Amino acid sequence: MNGYGMEDEDLQQMYQEVILDASRHPHGRVRAGSDLATEGSSSLQGDTALAASHEYCTAGESHQFNPTCGDEATIHVEVSRNEPRTIDRIVWDGQGCSISQASLSVMTDLVQGSTVDDAMRLESLFHRLMSSRGAGLTDEEENEALGDAVVFQGVSRYPMRIKCALLAWEGMKDSVARALATAAEPDQVPSAVGDTDAITSTDASANTDGRDTFNDNSKDRS
């Protein structure tokens, strides 16, 4: 039994349900080439910046690629300009294995509408979960905060699959960093965000074309 009080069989069953739901109804996914006018954007390609749906939001976008498995996704976020900064909109498009697609779907549900601080906390918790080598997190409140994402605990046993699960969270983090960096520019928002260093730690934040080859840094974040 793990620290969350669930047997491995229960986690496996929940994981299968999450995968099945994501494959049938991937939450937050917007197909490139579809009619996105109702979504407030014209495209969702890795090299194309999206306009924010609302004038009070600042948009950020990141394209992530996992060469090990071939997973790739473009994650687009819109962050409010008012404090507390919130993720008012997050959508994505991509393709890959069931783990990456399910992780994108679950991540979207967890961070949609949350504050940036809460989203970054969840990203940190998920990285810790992926570094647990199957043991999971022992703190009940942390497991509850992760919600459905806790079922990816079993993935942490397999180093080659960890990258698939982390791709969604790396993309979200980088997209938020880009949105905050844009908001901090003088011609965008008068007041800059207090401290973005902790959020802009990914290499992709310095990549101006919006594309990043995803690297697994989970071993350094245990």
Image (tube, rainbow, N blue to C red):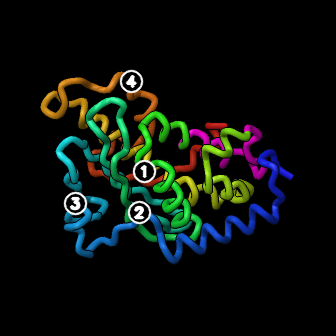
* Residue sitting at x 40%, y 35%: 200
Is residue 34 placed above or below 124 in the rendered structure? below
Return the disc, 4 or 3, that comes first in the chain's sequence.
3
Q: Nearer the viewer, mark 4 or mark 1?
A: 1
Q: CA distance from mark 2 to mark 1?
A: 9 Å
| Residue that mark 2 sits on | 28
**CA distance for labels 4 and 3:** 29 Å
Give SS at disc 2: loop
Q: Is residue 130 magenta?
A: yes
Where does the image place residue 108, in percent across and percent down from the top left? 46, 56
User: At label 1, which amino acid type do we have?
Assistant: Gln
- Pointers 2 and 1 in contact (C-beta within 8 Å): yes
| Residue 84, quarter of picture | top left
Dot 4 or dot 1: first in sequence order is 1
Q: Dots 2 and 4: beta carbons under 8 Å?
A: no
Location of mark 1 (residue): 112
Seen at 64% across and 61% down, the residue is 161
Query: Residue 95: where, in percent of width, then height?
Result: 45, 70
Q: Nearer the viewer, residue 116 or 129?
A: 116
Q: Which residues are magenta?
A: 123-139
Contact (Cβ within 8 Å) of mark 3 with mark 1: no
Disc 3 secondary structure class: loop
Determine the residue positioned at 50% across, 70% down. 96
**Alpha carbon separation for disc pair 2 and 3:** 13 Å
Q: On the image, numbered disc 4 is attached to which residue?
A: 195
How many C-alpha atoms fall within 10 Å of the one at disc 3: few (<14), some, or many (≥20)? Answer: few
Residue 183 picture quarter: top left
Tell me residue 168's x, y (percent): 49, 55
Amino acid type assigned to the residue bearing label 4 in the image: Asp
